[in-house]
Amino acid sequence: MVNPAIYVRTKADIVNERKGSLFWVVVFVGCSIYFPEYAFISQLLAGYFAYSFLNTIIPLTQILFVLFLLWIFTDVFN
């Protein structure tokens, strides 16, 4: 008997996760442009969904994305 608690992710599931994450990245980047007063929180949320999007492609890109954000923030605050 198959254990229903074990769920195998299919390729279609991964593609749907990518589409959803990419959609929210575009939405929050657009919000940060059209509503500059909410830019900070919109950019944080866009960064979170971009991080999730990269996780579905190659987990190594998460590390590169975090390093890129650290590089950007150190340039901004120095």
Image: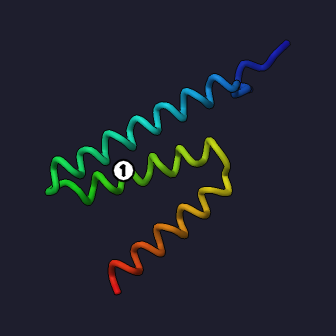
Q: Quadrant of residue 78?
A: bottom left
Few, some or many C-alpha atoms within 10 Å of disc 1 (few <14, some 14-19, many ≥20)?
some
Report x, y in % for residue 22: 45, 38
**Which is nearer the eye, 67 or 9?**
67
Residue 12 relative to residue 74: left or right: right
Report x, y in % for residue 65: 54, 61
Residue position marked by numbered label 1 in the rendering:
45
Asked if 75 appears above or below 3 in the picture, the reply is below
Q: Which amino acid lies under the numbered mark 1 shown in the image of this protein?
A: Leu
Q: Residue at x 69, y 28 (%)?
A: 9
Residue 60 relative to residue 2: left or right: left
Which of the image's four quarters has the N terminus?
A: top right
What colour scheme has been applied to the protein in the rendered image? rainbow
Residue 37 relative to residue 68: left or right: left
Report x, y in % for residue 54: 57, 48
Q: Residue at x 61, y 63 (%)?
A: 63
Q: Quadrant of residue 15?
A: top right
Question: Total marks drawn?
Answer: 1
Q: Residue at x 70, y 24 (%)?
A: 10
Report x, y in % for residue 37: 14, 57
Residue at the outermost right position: 1
Q: Residue at x 60, y 47 (%)?
A: 55
Asked if 26 appears above or below 67 in the picture, the reply is above
